Image (cartoon, rainbow, N blue to C red):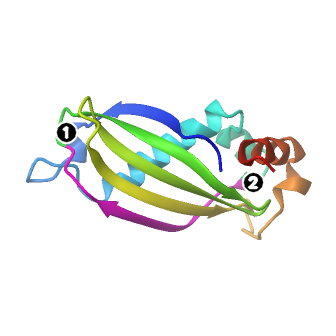
């Protein structure tokens, strides 16, 4: 498991619902934004992987809504790589309102590596060895 990496953002008006809170469907978008920036920060650019024929679909997502985020709130997402097998990877997330630190959402996602076009599973070790080595470093393997 890697150390948590922190991503910061602010709730936009379009992310809220009629009650003025972040609509539940937008938490998956928040997690995706944080995860994409995590990949870039770790030297694992998703656009580069896609140019090389590898895509990373989400195969499961779970979450727990604990408190509300509202329009204008600043928040942070702690992204943690929880596991990596060479063909799959998993993340955990904690979304906290700033500056209070109130935990608003806790979730996990699982992903796999597939070949763009036919979507057949692939091993990152064989297709992108540098990325595979970096993932192993991040998980302490």
In the picture, the disc for residue 131 is: none
Which residue lies under the disc numbered 2? 54
In the picture, the disc for residue 13 is: 1
SS assignment at label 1: helix
Q: Principal SS element in the magenta part?
A: strand
- Write the residue at 80% across / 59% down: 86
Q: Which quadrant of the figure has residue 117?
A: bottom right
Q: Which quadrant of the figure has residue 74?
A: top left
In this view, the residue in front, 117 or 102, is 102
- Write the residue at 51% across / 54% down: 92
- Write the residue at 38% across / 56% down: 106
Neighbour tally class for label 2: few under 14, some 14-19, many 20 plus, Cα within 10 Å: many
Question: In the rendered view, would you say 10 is above or below 106?
Answer: above
Neighbour tally class for label 1: few under 14, some 14-19, many 20 plus, Cα within 10 Å: few
Outermost residue to the left: 19
- Magenta part of the protein: which range? 55-69
Residue 111 screen position, x and y as percent: 62, 62
Q: Is residue 25 left or right of residue 87?
A: left
Give the alpha-carbon distance from disc 2 to disc 1, as whole Å: 34 Å
Residue 114 screen position, x and y as percent: 73, 63
Residue 113 screen position, x and y as percent: 72, 60
- Write the residue at 81% across / 64% down: 122
SS assignment at label 2: strand
């Amino acid at each position: 498991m890697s150390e948590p990496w922190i991503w910061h953002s602010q709730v936009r008006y379009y992310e809220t619902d009629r009650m003025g809170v972040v609509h539940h469907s937008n938490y998956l978008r928040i997690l995706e934004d944080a995860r994409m920036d995590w990949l870039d920060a770790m030297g694992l650019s998703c656009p580069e992987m896609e140019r090389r024929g590898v895509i990373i679909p989400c195969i499961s997502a779970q979450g727990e809504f604990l408190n509300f985020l509202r329009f204008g709130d600043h928040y942070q997402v702690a992204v943690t790589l929880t596991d990596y097998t060479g063909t799959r990877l998993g993340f955990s997330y904690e979304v906290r309102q700033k500056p209070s630190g109130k935990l608003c959402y806790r979730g996990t996602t699982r992903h796999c590596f597939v070949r763009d076009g036919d979507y057949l599973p692939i091993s990152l070790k064989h297709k992108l060895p540098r990325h595979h080595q970096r993932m192993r470093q991040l998980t302490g393997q």
